[in-house]
Amino acid sequence: MADIKNGDAYISVDVETDGPIPGPYSMLALGMAYCGSFDGRSMELTPRPDKTFYVEIKPISDEFEYEALHVNGLDRRRLANEGTDPKEAMESACNWIDEVSGDNRPIFVAYPASFDWLWVHWYFTRFTRQGSPFGHSGCFDLKTAVAVKGRAPISMSSKSQLPSALRSDLPHTHNALDDAIEQANIFFKLMVMTDGRPNSFQKRSFLLYSPRSVKALKATD
């Protein structure tokens, strides 16, 4: 019987690769940042996660695209010698996800999710016995959420088109961990943005990342 999970554990994920698809090409770096949780009633989020995971991975093939390496700045030759074995890297990633998720179901968060999900799901399926801890559908696509929240087309909801209120306070560096934390900052801003829902819902869904804010929130219930 599958374990019953209490709610969602949001994990911002970013990858750096040497090509467009896994298999012929390789995932060279994986970064993750724990954003917080939601049980359907109360939400606990942080704008700058301190629970993080980062690994650089040994390439799995000889194929690569120079453009991809130019963007991420990773040294493929160094990783061929010093990178973590893919099986070891993904097992470590599984263990970290299980640890930070606790009794909640891990939910993959990315902007957009389509590219990063493809790589991470393939690597977990290929290199771990248990497969992906995110399952086949545990995914939160920030681009879609921004489009829905802003009542905008998907084609007008890219990261470069974000309204100022949702733009990250952190730089986009093409380092997988930096960019996972940057995404977490956008996720935080999106989730706490007032959107006209009843105050009772907003009150329970706002930031709970310090003892003082927790105490203040409970005092208003």
Image (tube, helix red, strand yellow):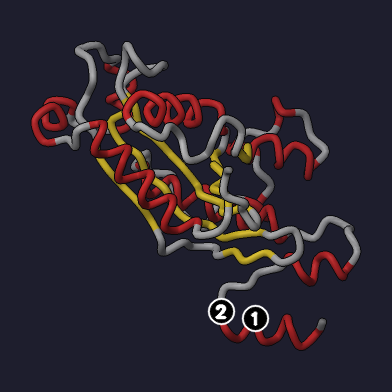
- Residue 14 placement (x, y as % from top left): 43, 39
Q: Amino acid at mark 2?
A: Ser
Q: Count residues near mark 1 (Cα–Cα under 10 Å), then give few for <14, some for 14-19, many for 20+.
A: some
- Whether the residues at callouts 1 and 2 have beta carbons within 8 Å, the answer is yes
- Residue 116 placement (x, y as % from top left): 47, 31
- Residue 216 placement (x, y as % from top left): 70, 86
Against 36, residue 144 (above or below) is above
Question: Dot 1 corresponds to which residue?
Answer: 214
Q: Quadrant of the C terminus?
A: bottom right
Q: Name which residue lies at 71% across and 41% down.
A: 145
Q: Quadrant of residue 196?
A: bottom right
Q: Secondary structure at mark 1?
A: helix
Q: Name which residue lies at 50% across and 47% down.
A: 12
Q: Nearer the viewer, residue 40 or 68?
A: 40
Against 80, residue 84 (above or below) is below
Q: Which mark is residue 210?
A: 2
Q: Quadrant of the N terminus?
A: top right
